[in-house]
Image (cartoon, rainbow, N blue to C red):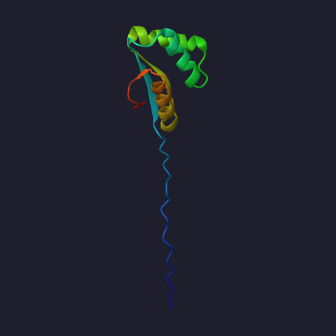
Amino acid sequence: MTQTIVAPKQQQAQKTTRQLYPNYKVIVLNDDVNTFEHVAKCLITYIPNMTSDRAWELTEQIHFEGQAIVWVGPQEQAELYHMQLQRAGLTMAPLEAA
């Protein structure tokens, strides 16, 4: 008698694909209301690790170019910084994916 041996079905290797969450840009817009000092102070207060020199560079960029990206990172943090800057009176662009 002949015995047939059936090999077990090969399991297809499951590949795990990692998709990273997109980063979001926090953008401050120029306006005719806020002073340079106020904008720089808000950036130092609400954006982590913001130095005084960097805050002034961004403030000048906002004034002369009309806007500046002041922070890029995960959505939840971006929403927080956006809200804080807006509540402080800065004119904000809507959050956008980076």
Residue 62 higher or lower than 84, as above or below: above
Q: Position of residue 41 (x, y in %)?
A: 55, 16
Residue at image position (40%, 13%) is: 33
Q: How many marks?
A: 0
Residue at 50% x, 52% y: name it.
16
Q: Nearer the viewer, residue 76 or 22?
A: 76
Name the residue rendered at 53%, 19% in the picture. Answer: 42
Q: Quadrant of the C terminus?
A: top left
Query: Which percent across, then down, holds residue 74?
Result: 51, 35
Coordinates of residue 20 in the picture (x, y in percent): 49, 41
Q: Is 28 left, or right, of 48 in this rendering?
A: left
Residue shown at 56%/25% (left/top)? 46
For the residue pair 7 and 24, the one nearer the viewer reads as: 24
Q: Is 50 in front, or is 21?
A: 50
Q: Please identify the residue farthest to the bottom as the structure is shown.
A: 1
> Is 2 drawn above or below residue 30 in the view shown?
below
Q: Quadrant of residue 44?
A: top right
